[in-house]
Amino acid sequence: MTKTKVILIVSFVLVFAAGAALGVLLARPEKPPPHPSSWLAAELDLSAEQRKQMEAIWSDAMGATFARHGEKRAAVVQERDQAIQALLSEAQQAQYQAIQQDYTRKMNELSQERKRAFDDAVERTKRILTPEQATKYEELMKKHRERGMGPGPGGFRGRRRPPPLPNRLPTN
């Protein structure tokens, strides 16, 4: 092969490789846009600093606290179900009732824990808002409570309650 052909082939390969590299770079998806603003941030017209503080408040409240709540709730349900399986005779109906009452008490305690975390996050949110934003925030929270969203009376619809005590428990 002549020197000219080698240079021409190498040049062609380099141009092809450069084009391929450029194509790969251009085909990469762009970085995802920053986390979209919440409806609440938009409704309250929060500043950038307030949005940042709001995200920190609610990430903490919704993340770790609610994750622990779910784990605790599942443990209480499992504990109750195992206890019920062990109690199958009629003579043990009083014990079954006590288990049900204990379960209800524990679930209520967990609900109160979650409500306290939610209420704390609401109060922390209010502290970062301007008076106008705080007024609007209160109105929005009221609307959500009326629609059954959030903890408290009328909130978190569809909660599971323990089954009623049957008239007769099956026996083995």
Image (cartoon, rainbow, N blue to C red):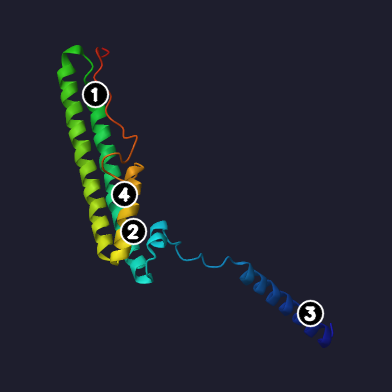
Q: Which quarter of the rendering shows the C terminus?
A: top left
Instruction: Find disc 4 in the rendering and name its residue.
Output: 142
Q: Which residue is mark 2?
A: 136
Q: CA distance from mark 2 to mark 4?
A: 10 Å
Task: Name which residue type carries label 4.
Answer: Lys
Compare marks 4 and 1 and give the one earlier in the sequence: 1
Q: Which residue is mark 1?
A: 84
Gap between marks 4 and 1, in whole Å? 40 Å
Q: Are marks 1 and 2 in contact (CB under 8 Å)?
A: no
Tag 1: Cα neighbours inside 10 Å, few (<14), some, or many (≥20)?
some
Tell me: residue 3, above or below residue 111.
Answer: below
Which of the pair 3/146 is nearer the observer?
A: 146
Horizontal side, residue 7 vs residue 81: left or right: right
Contact? badges 4 and 1 (CB < 8 Å)? no
Secondary structure under the numbered disc 3 in the rendered image:
helix
Residue at the spot of label 3: 9
